Image (cartoon, coloured by chain):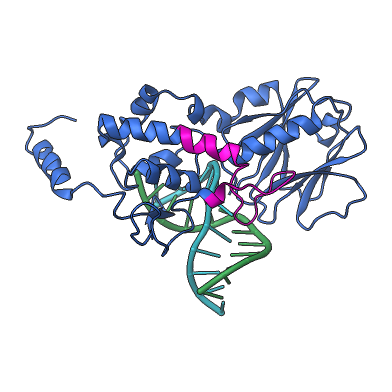
Chain colours: A blue, B green, C cyan
Amino acid sequence: MPELPEVEVVVRQLRAELRGLTLGSVRVRHRDVFRPATGLTVEDTRGHRVVDVTRRAKLILIPLSGSVTLTVHLRMTGRVEVCAPARPIALHTHVVVPLSDGRELRFVDPRRFGRVQLLDERALARDSFLARLGPEPLEMSCDELDRGLASRVGSLKGALLDQSLVAGLGNIYADEILFRAALHPRLVACRLSTDELRRLHEEMRAVLQQAIEGGGSTISDYRSLRRPGSFQTQHRVFGRAGQACLRCGTSIRKIRVAGRGTHICPTCQPHRRRRRARRIRARAASGGGKG
DNA sequence: TCTAACCTGATC
DNA sequence: GATCAGGTTAGA
């Protein structure tokens, strides 16, 4: 569940907790979860100082002295803890890193989708996940978004979830952004009008900004270091299937788009009449139009 | 561009 | 007991 806002909140807290501390060797409790780059081992964090804690899309980056970087991806159910060693190890704790202030950094993930990596400069530069990421949504101009969508013939929601187009959105925020921009998730991504594009860009920034300020959304697994987020109370469609739309009263529907559960208000997010799409296709087929 | 798969836990 | 889940990716 953690998407950009949740990861950003965790990153800010981790930065305050970890910056300047020195790490010990990584203790691995589940092999699949800790992935050191070729040539690196669990020993290669020992004695290195935390230079900073930053974020790229949904990935937590912890650059260390000695030109190595610890990365943490929470995926669906991962979380981090910074706590005293005496605290009992939570179920599904897979990686533990001792800290020079006597505490421990722990990575917990019931579903084991998450990953902790240790990368040197070379591995970081070559990391295929990082290399494929598109621009950060909060730093993206409307023009950039336009260019990104221009070649996308699939659904608008599918495009927003594609990390190579915009990096950091997930299912919750895609739904919330589309509702607030009054856009149907099944609209063809490359066919937005100028006004629709402008609304999408505006709401993307607004929703993410508000979510960060609200401490992210806490639905079931997500928890920042300190307290649960509160943005879920501001969700207008996500998780509200069957409830009345806060804007018009219509019952919120849950449908499937791009293989994901998708929440919409059928009234506020009208699907553009199919007739027009057919006309465009028919014109293209008869050789009359170029797209 | 879409689906299935990776896992476990919550919910129906 | 079956179904579904917030992310990502390999393969169709």
Please count the marks in the image: 0
Q: Please determine whether, in this image, residue A214 is positioned above or below residue A240.
A: above
Q: Quadrant of the C terminus of chain A?
A: top left
Q: Give the x, y percent position of residue A207.
A: 48, 38
Q: Give the x, y percent position of residue A222.
A: 65, 50
- Quadrant for residue A130, please give it: top right
Give me the residue at 60% from left, 41% from top: A214
User: Is residue A136 at least partly visible in the picture?
Assistant: no
Residue A13 falls left or right of residue A203: right
Give the extent of the magenta segment. Answer: A205-233
Q: Give the x, y percent position of residue A94.
A: 77, 49
Q: Give the x, y percent position of residue A147.
A: 34, 25
Between A36 and A191, the residue placed more toward the observer is A191
Between A236 and A219, the residue placed more toward the observer is A236
Residue A183 falls left or right of residue A229: left
Q: Is residue A55 magenta?
A: no
Q: Is residue A226 magenta?
A: yes
Residue A60 falls left or right of residue A66: left
